Image (spheres, rainbow, N blue to C red):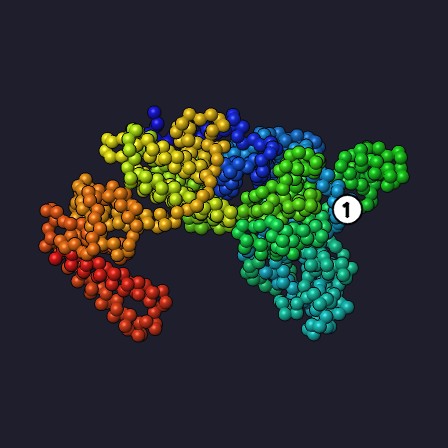
Amino acid sequence: MIPAQFDAKQVEKKWYDYWMENKYFHSTPDHRTPYTIVIPPPNVTGVLHMGHMLNNTIQDVLIRRARLKGFNACWVPGTDHASIATEAKVVAKLKSEGINKSDLTREEFLKHAFDWTEKYGGTILEQLKQLGCSCDWDRTKFTMDDDMSASVIKSFVDLYNKGMIYRGYRMVNWDPEAKTTLSDEEVIYEERQGKLYHLKYQIEGSEEFVTIATTRPETILGDTAICIHPEDERYFHLKGKKAIVPICNRVIPIIFDEYVDMEFGTGCLKVTPAHDINDKTLGDKHGLEIIDIFNEDATLNSFGLHYEGKDRFEVRTAIEKELESIGALAKVETHTNNVGTSERTKAVIEPRLSDQWFLKMDELVKPAIKAVLESDEIKLHPSRFNNTYAHWLNNIRDWNISRQLWWGQQIPAYYYGDGKEDFVVAENIEDALALAKEKTSNANLTTNDLRQDPDALDTWFSSWLWPISVFGGMMDPENEDFKYYYPTNDLVTGPDILFFWVARMIIAGYEYTGEKPFSNVYLTGLVRDKQGRKMSKSLGNSPEPLGLIEKFGADGVRVGLLLSASAGNDILFDEELCNQGKGFSNKIWNAFRLIKGWEVADIAQPESSKVAIEWYEAKLQKALAEIEDNFDKYRISDALMAIYKLVWDDFCSWFLEMIKPGYQQPIDSTTFNKAIEMLEANLKLLHPFMPFLTEEIWQYIADRTPEQALIVAEWPTITSVNEKLIADFELATEVISGIRTIRKDKNISFKDTIELKVVNNENASTYFDSVIAKLGNVASLEYVSEKVNGALSYRVKSNEYFIPVGEGVDIEAEIAKLTEELNYTKGFLKSVQGKLSNEKFVSGAPEQVIANERKKEADALAKINTLEESLASLK
């Protein structure tokens, strides 16, 4: 017995378990062509959000379609250790237990971190299963797995030995909350309202002052010079002079450099080399002292005098009052500027001088530029992101790859002395010892004499190897999996990590394999609410993904998301979209129940059914060609819409109506079998988008062996399309609609048969006459050479259709009604034409307004013609 309702919850678990038991998701190399996707690894301690839902639904659509098309489909899942975010969570957890990170050894801390990820990690992967994601779970990877870490270390050592990794004392972006450096790409700039402080610096040995504007008055404690443009006549007299920094009373030189903009502010610039990259450049040029006033958590150190130990923002408020009290504050203005914040912790970034590890990018980047922007070897979808990609890669700087964290791959540099160059780089401590002995000519060195660099590598330095390392390609490039699955095919991700991850994977791919890591990159948009706002917990506008699945079913949510998810464009998400998806599920289920509810008999096939089948086969082929074209162009939403229209409009609304047997009558077996065949073709097209519903119906249709499951069925094959048949049916549907309109308007029961007489001015095909007769309940359809008097009529193109009236129709009342409508329409036409004949109106109105008025005129003329012909046929 087929249930009356589709029970998504029961069906989803049943079929996911079935797919897992039969290992449909698992892939091993064989004779087939591989189709490979690697998942963008989410944060190991993360949970499913709407962006994940969209991204992974698209990936599942691609992988399920590839499986149906006969490819050896392999979708590799996994998670990223997310060093900054995860370490912050572990530190917070330890703090709540009264444990400080600083009280632990690295090994003790890492044990806590692994315990944390063991407990909370992988939740998101389990949630993806509820969405229906058909990943090869046997291949699940974590960026901190032993083999993955070994790949990262091998990469570092290789690049160092090639002279591409170096250690340098540079100005970096410092996250004072995470207490680590960040790359330029991990700094998000936000426009914030602040203050501009105008400070007075006294010239040593005089009563004169120079005024300098700054947004960060606390940094004056690190000032080591004042800089003026050498051609600024206002300050010629200050050459060779010195100034006194307020509060700390440090005497600093006044230097002259063309870097200063004479037109900006007062033309004087305070120079704080330890806290601004441009000031550092000036300091190096002029040999200035470098004074770092901050601790690693952005509290002030001993150079902060009486502010030592206080937070930078607390000091900013306090120092404003102190400057005012000593007469060193000229004025304060409101000021808007861009403030750099940490992508992970949201803390305001501090520029800071620090010894860090860097990767030279100028040569590495060249193959990645060529692959996307020149050779088209890798395609971005949509292609407008090529401009963003080009901007980033053409302006690339050396990559700061070290992080002051413990959670991550520890940098494989081993120090044997106190000097900056007293280190070696090796994959393990034994190799490091051998190198150190060779470098120092000291055979007595032991591993106890070596200290490994405490810093960890940037998470992105781990994940840039993802398509290579998940198949063991770094450690064993000749292994069977790597040679079979790499390069992968498609990558689905968000444009926000186009540089962080996508570009870097391309760089790594060419550096380590000489090949692209993938062929196509599908960039999804952001999921926003229906007001266009980015979804966030603080706004309370982000629905709970698993709650949506509970309410609408996984298939309903998948359809709801994808119906409006064109590549690269943001989605304005509304729960109604998921409700629409659920409604589509119910429509398909009810159509299936309708077919299975018919009694089947070995009787002759009606002509209308034969014609209907030929037409639907043509429509299916036309839709299939459109669907394939959309997939080829990565228009996943358009592909779904084509399937949606085919199933809802053509199959459910027309085809089933055409073949439906009469009340309490059986259907012939030929038509029934063809209806099942067409339904199965629909299910194959729908399966990538709605896997649970389609597998449920597929298995209800017949008893299937595991080898016959829908998930491994064969995608429909494209053949020729009978365009004429499709075009002829379009006219037939208008004829049927005309009959139904007259029946409704004139209260002619749909149970009563009618006669239909046709003046075939179009020389239209008569192929669908049997369908017109069935759906219009037409007892006789006759082609005549002239109009029929005393009949209700309507037009389709230039064809005229007449329905002789029966006794139930009041001819005089009908004539009066049509006459009244004709007179009204003529009056409306007169008013429209009056506007269009007014030169002042035509010359002054917007183009669109004129176009609307001309359309009104054309519509009125057409309606008048139809009404006059209808009246003529009744007289």
Q: Is residue 676 left or right of residue 824?
A: right
Residue at 68%, 61% in the rendered image: 270
Residue placed most toward the observer, 4 or 482: 482
The location of residue 409, given as percent across then percent down, is: 69, 37
Number of numbered discs overlaid on the protein picture? 1
Residue 660 seen in this snapshot:
no
Q: Is residue 782 left or right of residue 26?
A: left
Amino acid found under the numbered disc labelled 1: Lys
The location of residue 373, given as percent across then percent down, is: 61, 55
Q: Quadrant of residue 151?
A: top right
Residue at 37%, 39% in the rendered image: 584
Label 1 neighbourhood size at 10 Å, few (<14), some (14-19), many (20+)?
A: few
Residue at 68%, 37% in the rendered image: 473
Residue at 70%, 65% in the rendered image: 259
Question: Is 288 drawn above or below residue 314 in the view shown?
Answer: below
Residue placed most toward the observer, 789 or 23: 789
The location of residue 557, given as percent across then percent down, is: 43, 39
Residue 631 seen in this snapshot:
yes
Where is mark 1, residue-wise?
162
Residue placed most toward the observer, 562 or 753: 753
Q: Secondary structure at mark 1?
A: loop
Question: Is 792 drawn above or below residue 178 in the view shown?
Answer: below
Q: Quadrant of residue 123?
A: top right
The location of residue 721, given as percent across then percent down, is: 41, 46
Identify the image quadrant of the N terminus. Answer: top left
Identify the image quadrant of the C terminus. Answer: bottom left
Residue placed most toward the observer, 192 or 511: 511
